[in-house]
Image (cartoon, rainbow, N blue to C red):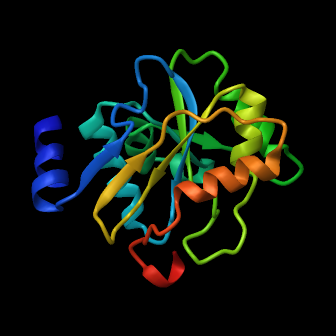
Amino acid sequence: MKALARFIYFKLLGWKVVGNTNFSKDTVKKAVIIAVPHTSWHDFFIGLYLRKVTGVKTNFVGKKELFIFPFGYYFRAVGGKPLDRTSGQNKVEAIAKLFEGEDEFRLALAPEGTRKKVKEWKTGFYYIAKAAHVPIIMFTLDFKNKQNKVSEPFYTTDDKEADFTFMRSFFEGVVGKVPEYS
């Protein structure tokens, strides 16, 4: 299966992986992974191919309603975890708790929170990383250059503004599938 994924990702689609190509998988077993820009449903499949070709186990969360038969089997198989999104719950705490009891858990999120163009990222991913005491790994969904650039693990500081400036700089010039949403 890995050989087929490599053939599709590298040969048919023409993508490449640059930077921290193994996501520090041997040393960083838990992390929040942010993917930017998130402009299309195609991003999900590029992420799945990236996961397969690098051999790095990653996870994602989705509303619990997605995890019912028959789709629930597929979403769990590709690393999905259901999340109860009813109002009145602290979602940051609920997601941070998913890291507990797992030997390996790398949660992939899109900080934009939507596939449309946004001026400001949502901050939940940042607070999840802080609450779970895990680093953030950044990767690009660069459709212009057909590459996934992966950062080294970034550990948050007590200066949120500086942290966001640093993280946003990693994604400068990256163009998503839908360029006007980048």
Quarter of the rendering containing residue 24: top left
**At x 41% / y 60%, what residue is drawn?**
141
- In the shown orientation, is residue 171 left or right of residue 90? left
Report x, y in % for residue 176: 43, 71
Tell me if I can see residue 1 in this picture: no
**At x 17% / y 36%, what residue is drawn?**
2
Report x, y in % for residue 155: 66, 32
- In the shown orientation, is residue 86 left or right of residue 53? right
**At x 11% / y 38%, what residue is drawn?**
3
Quarter of the rendering containing residue 153: top right
Picture layout, residue 93 above or below residue 87: above
Report x, y in % for residue 159: 83, 43
Quarter of the rendering containing residue 156: top right
Q: Between residues 153 and 62, which one lies in front from this camera angle?
A: 153
Picture layout, residue 133 above or below residue 63: above
Q: Between residues 16 and 57, which one lies in front from this camera angle?
A: 16
Report x, y in % for residue 160: 81, 47
**At x 71% / y 53%, what residue is drawn?**
164
Residue farthest right in this picture? 88
